[in-house]
Image (tube, rainbow, N blue to C red):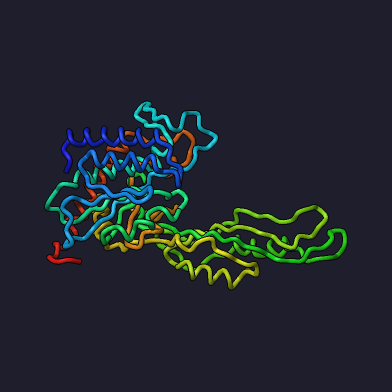
Amino acid sequence: MILNTDTEIAVNKAVQLLKQLISTPSFSREEAGTADVIYHYLKEEGVEVNRSGNNVWAVNKFYSNSRPTILLNSHHDTVKPNSGYTRDPFKPEMIDGKLYGLGSNDAGGALTTMIEAFLHYYRQPDLKVNLVLAATAEEEITGLGGIESIWSLLPHIDFAIVGEPTLCKMAIAEKGLLVLDCVAKGKAGHAARDEGDNAIYKALKDIEWFRTFQFPRISPTLGPVKMTVTLIEAGKQHNVVPAECRFTVDVRVTDAYTLDEVLAEISKHVLCEIKPRSVRLKPSGIEPGHPLVKAAMALGIQTYGSPTTSDQALIPVPSVKIGPGDSARSHMADEFIYVDEIKEGIAMYIRLLNQCSTLLPAPVAGNR
């Protein structure tokens, strides 16, 4: 375990690194600057670093094929600051124990504390696990240039810890996301005469179904599948019956269903044309007997099901989501994280990895 003096040093280093990241704009697909910061920071710490695009990763110094490998993953891209900001989003300011700045909470706090936890273990020769640290891009837009783009370049990963602001609670399941572009088709006609087939009226029937339908299977951790119509567009002028009505549905899928099952069920009930924008963002869950979950329970870490989507959806191995900061602060104006949360995050990751290691079987000689 980190000693008190070492804890203070690690917290100070995490805060200084986070200030650098805040000072460096890193909108999704524009993260080259923060990738440089992270790359050079790890280099200066004596770590052998890899980079592809705006993704940076490293492996513990005494990696062994005989050990299970845990991925520590968080992102360094941010959304654009909203109009409510009263502070410079790129100026890190420390006030009353809070560090203000864009990306401080989502997910700079999780990323920098994960980095310090990784450095704590980096040179230890007798670990029961391998650690892979990945600071990735394009999480906020679930872009193709993020974690997916480097997955084949990483060593074999057995399971993962995804760093996001969760108040250091552990999300053991996460909803997937389907965005559906729907088109109800009718026939144009003059509004003053009994002509045409109004596509808006057709769309209303399907929209009402999306509003009221309940999928029968309920996830113990994530609850029901949730469908919300969020956009609608139809018509060009007031006196013409519209031939098309387009609308968008946000579908949050639980681990009780696959994306294909949800699509099949929807298709049975609606008449509109449906086109999913992506089927990449799958729901995720982890077995309650997994060492990560058992470790959390032993440490008194609260577990829950997360309604939001992260890089967990793109990671094809068992994973959990946990980190310092509060999801409620993500994307808010004048974003901030408490320094005490950074301290708690470093200690939490180290305790979790230590406890998880004790629950894993002894390493087996030979290659994987």
Where is residue 186? Give x, y as percent. Answer: 74, 66
Seen in the picture, residue 255 relative to 54 is either above or below; the reply is below
- The answer to whether any part of residue 265 appears in the image is yes
In the rendered image, which quarter is residue 38 located in? Answer: top left
Where is residue 222? Give x, y as percent. Answer: 43, 59
Q: Residue at x 49, y 40 (%)?
A: 80
Give the left or right position of residue 159, taking residue 65 as reference: right
Where is residue 348? Give x, y as percent. Answer: 26, 45
Q: Residue at x 31, y 50 (%)?
A: 134
- The answer to whether any part of residue 169 appears in the image is no
Give the quadrant of the N terminus. Answer: top left
Q: Return the residue nearer the eye: 276 or 296.
A: 276
Q: Residue at x 16, y 62 (%)?
A: 66
Give the quadrant of the C terminus. Answer: bottom left
- How many numbered circles are shown? 0
Q: Return the residue nearer the eye: 292 or 154.
A: 154
